[in-house]
Amino acid sequence: MRLNEEQRKLWADKLMDLANIATAALVFGQFLSGTGFQYPLFMAGVAIYVVLWIWAMVLRR
């Protein structure tokens, strides 16, 4: 499937929104819960953010 420039820009923007939501839920959400800090959730949040950020940057080129 080929995307035109406008579609790629829109997808990149929405991927960054998704990356921010995933980071907020998995990283910053730990500080709001009563369970304390969990390193695997922190790393999952960072990994998801990095993957989605890279994907968004590839779409923007």
Image (cartoon, rainbow, N blue to C red):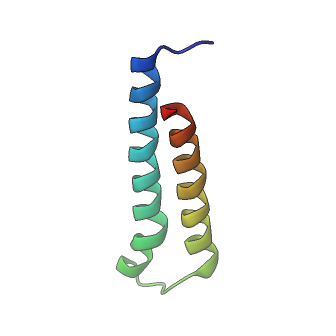
Q: Residue at x 57, y 47 (%)?
A: 54
Indicate left or right for 19 with 46 as reference: left
| Image location (x, y in percent) of residue 38 | 57, 81
Please state if 29 lies on the left or on the right of 55 as rendered: left
- Return the residue nearer the eye: 4 or 32: 4
Residue 46 screen position, x and y as percent: 56, 65
Q: Residue extending furthest left?
A: 32
Image quarter of the N terminus: top right
Q: Nearer the viewer, residue 43 or 6?
A: 6
Residue at horizontal 46 percent and vertical 40 percent from the top:
15
Please say if 41 is above or below 1: below
Q: Residue at x 39, y 37 (%)?
A: 13
Q: Is residue 3 left or right of residue 1?
A: left
Where is residue 45? Give x, y as percent.
54, 64
Rendered residue at 45%/30% (across/down): 11
Q: Quadrant of residue 43?
A: bottom right
Toward the viewer: 18 or 5? 5
Residue located farthest toward the front when viewing the structure as drawn:
61
Image mark count = 0
Q: Is residue 7 above or below residue 34?
A: above
User: Quarter-wise, where is residue 9 in the image?
Assistant: top left
Residue 44 in the image: state x and y as whole percent: 61, 65
